[in-house]
Image: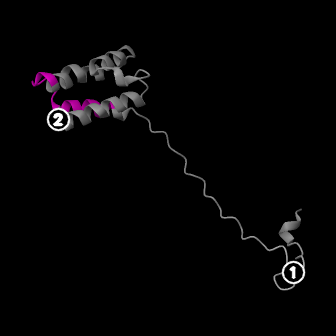
Amino acid sequence: MSSTRAAVWARAVKAAGALGLLPAKPAGFTPAELAAEVQERGEDRLARLVRGWYYPASYGRAAGALTDEEAVRLVASLEAEVVEVPVPPAPVVQPAPPRRPKNCELCGLPLPPRPDDRGP
C-alpha cells in the first residue's frame, strides 16, 4: 500500500471519528467493516471511498470508480464538516509578590504591617 493511500485513508478515518461516526473500538475493524458501520449511521462517503478507491487500488491493483483526486476531494468534504472546538488559552499565572520579611534585617524587631496587609 502506498504511503499516500494510507495517509488519505487515515484522514478519512480521523474525520469520521471526529464526526462521531466510528464504533467505540475501531482498531479491530477492516476498512469495509468500518465503512459499513459508518454507513449504518447515515454517512455513505466512507463506503464509497472503500469500494470505489481504497480496495481496488490497494488490493486489486486496478483503478476503481474514483480517481485519486476524487478520493482526496471526498475525504476533504468529510473533513470540512468537522467542527474544531476552540481550546481556551491557559490562564496567565501571576508570579507571587516577593515575600516581605517579618522582622527588620538590621535590628530584628517585627515590622509594622503594610497598608495593603490590613484589609478593608
| Relative image position of residue 51 (x, y in whole percent) | 21, 19
Tell me which segment is drawn in magenta.
59-78
> Left or right: where does residue 73 sit relative to residue 100?
left
* Main SS category, magenta section: helix
Which amino acid, by three-letter code, is at mark 1? Gly
Residue 67 is a magenta residue: yes
Residue at which label 1 appears: 108
Which amino acid, by three-letter code, is at mark 2? Ser
User: Between residues 5 and 105, which one lies in front from this camera angle?
Assistant: 105
Q: Earlier in the sequence, mark 1 or mark 2?
A: 2
| Relative image position of residue 64 (x, y in whole percent) | 14, 22
- Tell me: residue 99, above or below residue 104: above
User: Between residues 99 and 18, which one lies in front from this camera angle?
Assistant: 99
Q: Tell me, yes or no, whether the two marked residues, 1 and 2, touch with CB atoms within 8 Å.
A: no
Residue at which label 2 appears: 2
Q: Residue at 87% of width from left, 81% of height from top?
A: 108
Residue 13 is a magenta residue: no
| Relative image position of residue 85 (x, y in whole percent) | 49, 39
Label 2 CA crowd tier, 10 Å (few <14, some 14–19, many 20+)? few
Identify the element where label 2 is drawn. Answer: loop
> Left or right: where does residue 116 sit relative to residue 83?
right
Which is in the foreground here, disc 1 or disc 2? 1
> Left or right: where does residue 8 sit relative to residue 23?
left
Label 1 CA crowd tier, 10 Å (few <14, some 14–19, many 20+)? few
Name the outermost residue toward the front.
108
